Amino acid sequence: MKKIIIINGPNLNLLGNRERDVYGDMSLQDIEKKTKAKCKEMKMDLFFCQSNNEGELINFIQSVEEKYDGLIINPAAFTHTSVALLDALRAISKPKIEIHLSNIYNREDFRKKSITSEGVNGLICGFGSLSYILAIEAMNNLIKV
Ligand code: DQA
C-alpha cells in the first residue's frame, strides 16, 4: 500500500473561521476527512498533520525519507519565507507536491513568490479543498511502488 503524508502549515488549523471569502467554509478536520476518504478509495495510507511551528514542519518533512512514499505539503505563509523548509524538501528523494487552497498568483505580490515550490515536483493551487484531492491523484501517479 502506498503511504503518503499531508503536511499543513501555520494558521491552517483556523480554516472554517479564517478569511472564509479566500479559504472557504471547510475546517481542516473536514479536509482531513475528505482526503482520508479519497485515499481509502485509492487504497493509499494517509497521515494528515498540521503545525504552526517551522521546526516541527521540518521534522515532518525529514520523516518522509524513512516512513513514506510521497509528501503533499501546504506550507501556508512559510511558502513565501522559508529557506529552511526548502532545504528540508530538497533533502527528500520521494515525490513531493505543494498545494494551496487559494491561487497565490492572483493575490498580493508577496504571495506570488513560492520559495518552497523550488523543492517539489509540482504545484497545485487555487481549487480550494479540491487542491488536496487533485494532489492525491497526482501523487498516486508519481509513486512507483
Ligand atoms: C495558503 C496561501 C498562503 O499564501 C497563506 O499564507 C496561507 C494559505 C493557501 O492554502 O491558499 O496561509 O497556503
Image (cartoon, rainbow, N blue to C red):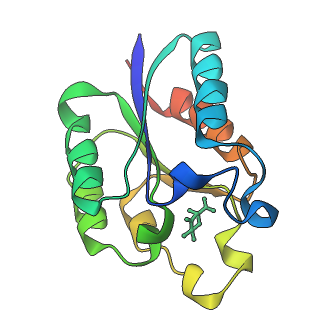
* Outermost residue toward the right in this view: 21
How many labels were placed on the picture?
0
Front position in the image: 58 or 86 = 58
- Image quarter where the C terminus lies is top left
Position in image of residue 58 (x %, y %)? 24, 54
Up the image or down, 79 lies above or below 95; here it is: below
Front position in the image: 68 or 15 = 15
Up the image or down, 130 lies above or below 117; here it is: above
Instruction: Tell me which corner region of the image, top left, top right, bottom left or bottom right, holds residue 23.
Output: bottom right
- Image quarter where the N terminus lies is top left
Position in image of residue 17 (x %, y %)? 69, 55
- Residue at screen point 20% across, 45% down: 62
Q: Is residue 54 left or right of residue 24?
A: left
Q: Is residue 96 left or right of residue 138?
A: left
- Residue at screen point 18% across, 29% down: 66
Instruction: Tell me which corner region of the image, top left, top right, bottom left or bottom right, holds residue 43.
Output: top right
Ligand 1 sits in quadrant: bottom right
- Residue at screen point 21% across, 58% down: 55
Position in image of residue 138 (x %, y %)? 59, 36
